Amino acid sequence: MLQTLSHFEQGIMVLASLVLLTSFLMLGQIRLLLLIKTFAWQGALLALTTALVAADSGQTHLYLSAALTFAIKALLIPWMLHRLIFRLGIPHQEEPLGRPSVVLLSGAALVLFSYSVSAPLIELSSHVTRNTIAISIGVVLVSMLLMVTRHTALAQVVGFMSIENGLFFSAVSATYGMPLVIELGVAFDVLVAAVLFGVFFFQIRESIDDLDVDRMTRLTEADE
Amino acid sequence: MTPLAALLLAPLAGMLLLAATGHRRLGAPLNILVSALTLWAAWALAVQVQREGAFLAGHGYFYIDAFNVWLLLLTAFVGLTTALFSWSYMQHERDHRQIGPTRMRLYHASYQAFVFAMLLAQSTDNLGILWVAMEAATLATVLLVSLYGTPESVEAAWKYFILCGVGIAQALFGSVLVFFAAERVIPNPEDALSWHLLYQHAGQLEPVVLTLAFVFALVGYGTKVGLVPLHNWLPDAHSQGPTPLSAVLSGLLLHVALYAVIRVKMLVDGSLQTPLAGHLLMGFGLVSFLVAALFLHRQKDIKRMYSYSSIEHMGLMTFAFGVGGPLATFAGLLHMTAHSLTKSALFASVGQAIRIAGTQAMAHIRGLIRTQPKVGWALLLGTAAIAGFPPFGVFTGEFLILMATMKTWPRLTGTLLVGLAVAFAGLFRNVQPMVYGAVPEGQHPIRVSVWPVYLHLALVLWLGLSIPPVLAQWFDQATRLISGGSLP
């Protein structure tokens, strides 16, 4: 199969798998600072993949999407998070991960699942990127797993932003990206969300003296 | 300026203006003024649609038809009355809970931002912009939930942010899938998310992809509707934020999210030609309805109780739209209107009750009718209306939903009746001692204007006694649009 693909297409496949790899690296990463760095790498790889897709398919508006992704996901948001953890004074905080092998294996199972979900889509598509649809869904699901397995607000936010990465990737690989107006709208929402998350870190720390959201258990339907 | 432009620009300008001046004495009246302008624009828009029928505007990014025009009017109306209620309420909160000028500015600006997002979501023709607006509505309200800065409110806001954020991300994937299916039918990609074009070409859309898209959209927007088991954020956000926020969340946000689900369902129905989407809605709706009815019985906090009542009613509406057919759809639309008006009025009187009693714990709210009859009666009448007492509009909606169920799904009628009875009992066992009961020592009446509450209740009563002809005509057109048939 590989022989039938052009160099561009092979490049897209390699980069797409690297994006998925960063998802798994984040899943296993216990140091917050490195988590943010890996997230920045994911954004950069995503932007590069998008640029390659743009070059291969001739969809010039994708260059703009790639630039936007690079600016927001690889530079701006990681920089904001980076600054936040220094301002919160927790640059070296680690978050122990219970049963890392189980978590990583579940991640692999989710990727298999996303291949089975996307089978009908791949059959219908004639884009060069059709083989990356499954990977993009995989990124979304693995990021959700990241959010579920972590207890600190910061790691959950990285997971949240990584879900957005996966969704953006799915739009690029299934349809060569959404119309520009919508992509700008989504980017605006993501930016506002990032700012609000920053505000929340301080509010959460003020209220529970920590960023461990598992300690927020005041509101529940269970009887005391 | 066209009415549509005015409708969207008024809250947008209001947001910017209030971000600068919201903390001054002028803030609250300005908020009301902007909301009044918005309502006026919505009214002008309704007149325009009444005269000229459905139309496209703004380079095809906006589409107004019978279905969304009355929702826009309703949103603007509830926006105005809640702004009126919030004037005295927030003044009281500012003095008693030490809310600084920054937070008052945030409150007023966010209020208008929220109204803008709701209006944008309902007026746009583009499924992508619909998503952006729904997400923006979450972002606009999330800091309001934690306005008081208590640990509980921060927890509620965080839950709201994360659950709704992740939930609505599913809906974005649903939109990508719709776009994917549309690409091979609609040649120009810029138009491929345009709802009215998709609706025209629904029969050609790939059914497998649309089914997947609907599941994702239902989970995504369903999180914001508050469908069980995605409802966890709802009682927390409603109970911890300021009461005017609870009123607009229950009265508006949930309905707009349901509106988004129905728009996607209309596309899926056209593509699939099977009732799959309807069955999914019925399942989710019925489960939400029953679970929320049971949870009403174990609530201790007054705002939590009424937020479970919202889940219950949203479940019933979702069920009605799932049953489909002209009668059930008509009932769903009527119930949507009646619930929106009643629940926002109810939260306003709940806010006043909380101010009188000084607590949200229902065990300590007693003797409201004796302390201040107009607040006590508003709470009692509002609860009677929401519980489905005739002759209020909610009763008519529920009755029509039961009729439609009896026709198409006779076996489910019993379940619905039991659910309604359980919900009814759950509400009244808690409300009865709050409005009657002995007055606790030192409980005084407060200075408050209750006429917006009674105005809402009067409108709900009117809806129950006779639907005004203009509104009936709109409902009928919307019913025809959604269900493909009209009432006999």
Image (cartoon, coloured by chain):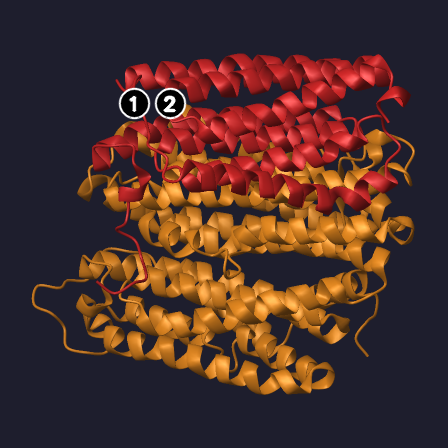
**Most foreground residue, B15 or B3:** B15
The residue shown at (63%, 36%) is A138
The residue shown at (58%, 63%) is B337
Residue B177 locus on image (x, y percent)? 75, 42
**Please, is residue B30 above or below residue B72 in the view?**
above
Q: Which residue is mark 2?
A: A32
**Real-space Cα separation, disc 2 to disc 1, in angstroms:** 6 Å
Precedes in sequence: disc 2 or disc 1 = 2
Question: Which chain does orange denote in the image?
Answer: B
In the rendering, which numbered label is found on residue B414?
A: none
Classify residue A33 by image quadrant: top left
Task: Tell me whether circle 2 and circle 1 mark residues in contact (CB < 8 Å).
Answer: yes
Q: In the picture provided, is B105 more to the left or to the right than B332?
A: left
Question: Which chain does red denote in the image?
Answer: A
Q: Which residue is mark 1?
A: A93
Classify residue B9 by image quadrant: top right
Q: Is residue B137 visible?
A: no
- Amino acid type for the residue under numbered disc 2: Leu
